[in-house]
Image: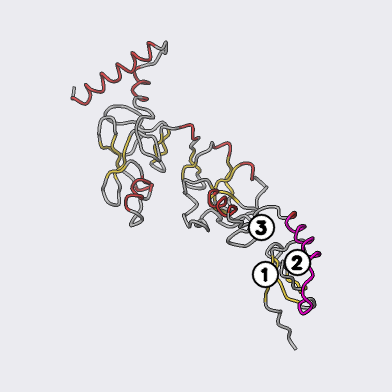
């Protein structure tokens, strides 16, 4: 028996003895598979293996560790990973859930499509065939929207505005690619998407419109009513009272000719003040 296997034999024996003292009946195979679970990994994942990057042939804890190390010079394609190294016995081997040498599970969750390992199964990992990658949060809690091209919370089923491939874009605030981002993403009323933390930062700076289409990201009816009252109470100087301007409403996309006011211009087709001044329409003689 090799020195590695002798070492593993004693570790598994001690593991079984500890479990027996707790009154738990565990087979040798079960103890071997679960040995070292949640004790190894990186800040991204708990796992019992490292990967050999196919792009540069270097060893990293995970693809995110690789991408952070290379600082965008090149990135790992998860589907190209072919070799992993068991951190329990240091054996390099082809991608598989169970180590071919010491017999431990290198990840309690394993996806042979994404070459993905993770011991922390409380995340509720699942592979979405339509997305083509693994997601977290529990399969029963999500549905795949074919038009938006991504998995959304079941609470948004038939309750969101579809935008073609809305998740296959960069966050309009931090410009990180959203589709496979590790950060939580929010679907706005208009259907566009961004990181939740970026949305909160926008709100802290009193920005209430989608950065892409300029539609309101929340119910602004109370704000519109307050503007109605302020405009009614504020008389414009005489030289501006009859001035008219053309506006485009960001909410309903209609144009209107309205009286100018320093506090804002209200759409004639909806209650919104989320408007912008535009050039007058061209009239043909």
Residue 145, which numbered label?
none
- Rendered image coloring scheme: secondary structure
Image quadrant where residue 73 sits: bottom left
Span colored in magenta: 223-240
Q: Quadrant of the C terminus?
A: bottom right
User: Answer yes or no: do the residues labelled 3 and 2 have beta carbons within 8 Å?
Assistant: no
Above or below for 254 versus 135: below
Query: Does dot 3 land on a helix, a strand or a loop?
Result: loop
> Crowding at label 2, few (<14), some or many (≥20) Cα neighbours within 10 Å?
many
Pick whichever of labels 1 and 3 is earlier in the sequence: 3
Report how far apart the C-alphas of labels 3 and 2 lie in the structure: 14 Å
Query: Does dot 2 land on a helix, a strand or a loop?
Result: loop
Relative depth, front residue between 240 and 243: 240
Instruction: Kindly identify which residue carries mark 2.
Output: 267
Residue at position x 33%, y 45% from top? 81
Where in the figure is residue 151, as x and y percent of width and height? 55, 46
Whether residue 227 appears in magenta in the rendering, the answer is yes
Residue at the bottom extreme, as displayed = 285
Image quadrant where residue 191 sits: bottom right
Magenta part mainly helix, strand or loop? Answer: helix
Report how far apart the C-alphas of labels 1 and 3 lie in the structure: 13 Å
Above or below for 11 versus 282: above
Where in the figure is residue 47, as x and y percent of width and height? 37, 34
Above or below for 23 versus 75: above
Query: Does dot 1 land on a helix, a strand or a loop?
Result: strand
């Amino acid at each position: 028996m090799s020195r590695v296997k002798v070492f593993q034999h004693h570790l598994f024996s001690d593991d079984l003895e500890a479990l027996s003292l707790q009154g738990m009946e565990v087979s040798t195979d079960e103890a071997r598979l679960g040995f070292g679970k949640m004790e190894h990994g990186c800040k991204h994942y708990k796992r019992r293996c490292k990967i050999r990057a196919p792009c540069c042939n270097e060893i990293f804890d995970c693809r995110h560790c690789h991408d952070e190390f290379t600082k965008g010079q090149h990135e790992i394609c998860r589907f190209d990973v072919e070799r992993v190294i068991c951190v329990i016995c240091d054996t390099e081997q082809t991608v598989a859930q169970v180590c071919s040498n010491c017999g431990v599970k290198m990840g309690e969750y394993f996806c042979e499509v994404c070459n993905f390992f993770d011991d922390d199964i409380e995340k509720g990992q699942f592979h979405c065939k339509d997305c083509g990658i693994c997601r977290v949060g529990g399969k029963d809690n999500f549905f795949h929207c074919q038009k938006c091209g991504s998995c959304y919370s079941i609470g948004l089923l038939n309750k969101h505005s579809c935008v073609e491939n809305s998740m296959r874009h960069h966050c309009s605030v931090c410009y990180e690619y959203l589709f496979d981002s590790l950060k939580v993403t929010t679907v706005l009323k208009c259907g566009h998407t961004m990181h939740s933390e970026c949305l909160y930062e926008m709100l802290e700076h009193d920005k209430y419109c989608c950065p892409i289409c300029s539609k309101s990201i929340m119910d602004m009816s109370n704000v519109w009513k307050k503007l109605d009252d302020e405009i009614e109470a504020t008389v414009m100087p005489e030289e501006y009272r009859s001035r008219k301007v053309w506006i485009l409403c960001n909410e309903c996309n209609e144009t209107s000719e309205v009286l100018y006011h320093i506090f804002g211009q209200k759409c004639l087709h909806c209650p919104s003040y989320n408007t912008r001044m535009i050039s007058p329409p061209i009239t043909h003689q």
